[in-house]
Amino acid sequence: MKWYYWVGVILFFVLGVTTLIPAPASKPSFLGYYAHCSFTPISTIICWVIAGAIYWLGKRG
């Protein structure tokens, strides 16, 4: 698998993790706490699905 696929996979995985980190925000997330993203856990799942798609495309080609 090419290096740029790995960069995409790692980038979106880390972005997904950062949406879970508690932080000051204007409104609570769907899980009930204040996080970097108020759409947590939906945004986390979206980032991880994108990371999985990039991984799948990299392995396929």
Image (tube, rainbow, N blue to C red):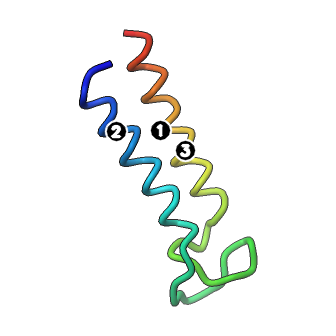
In the rendered structure, which disc, 1 or 2, sits on the residue that comes first in sequence?
A: 2
Q: Are marks 3 and 2 in contact (CB under 8 Å)?
A: no
Which element carries disc 2, helix, strand or loop?
Answer: helix
Q: Are marks 1 and 2 in contact (CB under 8 Å)?
A: yes
Q: Is residue 9 left or right of residue 17?
A: left
Q: Is residue 55 above or below residue 44?
A: above
In the rendered structure, which disc, 3 or 2, sits on the residue that comes first in sequence?
A: 2
Picture coordinates of residue 56, whole percent (x, y): 49, 21
Q: Amino acid at mark 3?
A: Trp
At a point 51% along the width and 56% down the height, the residue shown is 16
C-alpha span from label 1 to label 2: 7 Å
C-alpha span from label 1 to label 3: 5 Å
Q: Which residue is mark 1?
A: 51
Q: Amino acid at mark 2?
A: Gly
Q: Is residue 27 above or below residue 31?
A: below
Q: Which residue is mark 2?
A: 8
Question: Of 9 and 28, which appears nearest the observer?
Answer: 9
At a point 66% along the width and 75% down the height, the residue shown is 29
Q: Which residue is mark 3?
A: 48
Which element carries disc 3, helix, strand or loop?
Answer: helix
Picture coordinates of residue 41, whole percent (x, y): 66, 61
Picture coordinates of residue 53, whole percent (x, y): 50, 29
Q: Quadrant of residue 26?
A: bottom right
Which element carries disc 1, helix, strand or loop?
Answer: helix
